[in-house]
Amino acid sequence: MIRKYIDIGLITLGCILMLASFYVFSIGKREGQNFRNIVAQIKFLKDSVQTKMAGSVAWFKGEEEEKINAFGLGLTSSGSAARYLYLNKIQIISLDDSLIEFLPEDELKLSKGSVMVLNPDGKVKLADKAGASQVVKEGTLYTSTDKGIVGTPAKWQKSWIPEGDSYSVSFQNNILSELFLLAPPSLSIDRFGTACIGKIEPVAGDAGDVMYEVKANGNYLKLTDLNVVMPTAKTILEVRSVAGNVSSVWREIQLPSHCVTESAPVYPEDLSFFAITKQEVELDRADDMHTVVFYFSVEEKADIEISGPNMDRQASLQGEFKREYKLSPGSYVFKLSQEGRVLTKVITVKVKPKLKIKDSIFIEEQI
């Protein structure tokens, strides 16, 4: 009888251990930090990327920042790509239809597809599916073939795009191009003493070639490192990223109420010049001039800017301003700004089109 209970207990214990093992392996992908031999991590990916942890029989959908243990696998499907961080120092780009295994001690195994190591350290090796390995060289695209791994000289370049996929990879004319979507950063705002300070929070993947801009009511604010002093009047903030000649969209952020310590400036109501924001004027002849009177009256200092054909004037004035301008054909912009508020008027001066007659018939009336 005792032996019977012992057998039942052993069977029960075995079932519990089997269930526990299945549970551990099934959540291993989500709890990668429980593995002591983590060697790689997904940094960027496009479309369908899958991973399998060593000791697991299941494939899981790849995600950014996912950790992979030694002997774990990374699979990029057709039209997909991924960038991995290996041993916390080596950057690896895996093209579509590629299968890579992350071995310990500076070695990778490429069973199919193509990869490129951006910054090899002279130690990392790449093995083919038969186990033959070679030291990875910089500026080389490695492709798995039936005869082993073939290296092709290639150039790597990184580009930013204002819209599209967040990450994509292409290989043409021996150039491997990584394309990153330039997205606007976040802006966290905290109060320190009597002032509110905004701190730019870059998008993951932004490198040293990305800069940032902040505006309040259309005016650019000064950035010190990634910090900016917030205005004290209620305003709409805008932030964006800039890389070379590529700019992201503006992200709008409302200035928190606890940062507003003063009311918005009061403007007089007699700025009749700006009552009409757009105006078109026609002249009879090209050498005629249109006369306009630019008038305003403000209590605090204001900036004026006038631009147009043969006209580019800027000044800071206070009080009453009245001046007459002669406008020739063209487009003119009159701008008045004060404490973040901007008033603009555009005047377009045109010449009346000449009378054009085609196939006209004149009938003289007989008396």
Image: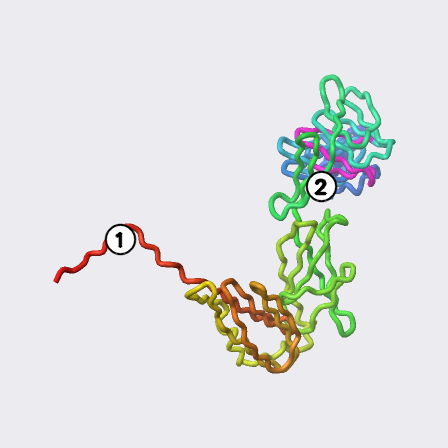
Name the residue at 81% across, 20% down.
Answer: 132
* Disc 2 element: strand
In magenta segment, residue 134: no
Residue that mark 1 sits on: 360
Amino acid type for the residue under numbered disc 2: Lys
Amino acid type for the residue under numbered disc 1: Ser
Against 341, residue 207 (above or below) is above
* Disc 1 element: loop
Name the residue at 76% across, 25% down.
Answer: 151
> Residue 210, how many percent across, how many down?
72, 51
Measure the alpha-carbon separation of dots 1 and 2: 63 Å
The foreground one among 108 and 175 is 175
Residue 35 relative to residue 200: left or right: right
Q: Based on the displayed image, in which of its 4 quarters is residue 363 positioned?
A: bottom left
Q: Based on the displayed image, in which of its 4 quarters is residue 185 positioned?
A: bottom right
Which region of the structure is painted magenta? Answer: 82-103
Looking at the rendered structure, the number of numbered marks drawn on it comes to: 2
Residue that mark 2 sits on: 158
The foreground one among 99 and 237 is 237
Q: As drawn, which residue projects farthest toward the left?
A: 367
Residue 364 relative to residue 55: left or right: left
